[in-house]
Image (cartoon, rainbow, N blue to C red):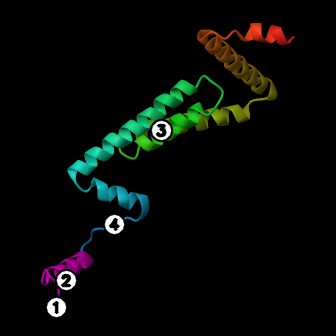
Amino acid sequence: MPIRDSDTGDSDVVKDEAARRSAMPARRSGLHGWLDGIRSNRTGALTLKIIIGVIGGVMVVGGLIMVPFPGPGWLVVFAGLAVLSTEFHWAHRVLEFGKRVLHAWTEWYKKQGWTIRIIVLIITAVAAIAIVYLGCKTVGIDLVMLANRFI
């Protein structure tokens, strides 16, 4: 083993040789490697868990609030679960369950005839209109009265 000139003597050479002989996989690169570096000590791991938990939790709650309204409610919920699943195993299981249910629903929907598809579309549209109307009514905006002014 060649000796290198360093402030630490031979320790860096010995460490390099031990790392080459080790069965341990090399450190990952990119985002996963960066997260592994943060998780390498207790403080970093706890801080990362708290930050991921807060960001993912806000996304899931915000998405659930948006679900009844037209827009990307479920997309935000799934994105929040994906963020949470980077640190929490339970979130990964919930995300996988949600993916299975969504896939089963879309497969069922694809197999239906035009009659069922139109009925589902009408029910979805009526529910969205009712939710928007009741949401506006709660805030004090009467959409029916506004529409009567323009007619």
**Three-letter code for the amino acid on which mark 3 is drawn:** Gly
Badge 1 is on which residue?
A: 3
Q: Based on the displayed image, in which of its 4 quarters is residue 52 positioned?
A: top left
Badge 3 is on which residue?
A: 80
Q: Residue furthest right?
A: 151
Checking the image for residue 27, the label placed there is 4
Labelled pair 3, 1 in contact (Cβ < 8 Å): no
**Three-letter code for the amino acid on which mark 1 is drawn:** Ile
Label 4 neighbourhood size at 10 Å, few (<14), some (14-19), many (20+)? few
Q: CA distance from mark 1 to mark 2?
A: 7 Å
* Label 1 or label 2, whichever comes before in sequence order: 1
Q: Image point 61% across, 34% down: which residue?
A: 72
Q: CA distance from mark 3 to mark 4?
A: 27 Å
Q: Image point 16% across, 91% down: which residue?
A: 3
* Label 2 or label 3, whichever comes before in sequence order: 2
Label 3 neighbourhood size at 10 Å, few (<14), some (14-19), many (20+)? many
The answer to which of 108 and 86 lies nearer the viewer is: 86
Label 1 neighbourhood size at 10 Å, few (<14), some (14-19), many (20+)? few
The answer to which of 50 and 111 lies nearer the viewer is: 50
The answer to which of 16 and 50 lies nearer the viewer is: 50
Checking the image for residue 13, the label placed there is 2
Q: CA distance from mark 4 to mark 2?
A: 19 Å
Labelled pair 1, 2 in contact (Cβ < 8 Å): yes
In the rendered structure, which segment of residues is drawn in magenta?
Answer: 6-21
**Three-letter code for the amino acid on which mark 4 is drawn:** Arg
Is residue 45 at all visible to an observer of this figure?
A: yes
Is residue 96 at all visible to an observer of this figure?
A: no
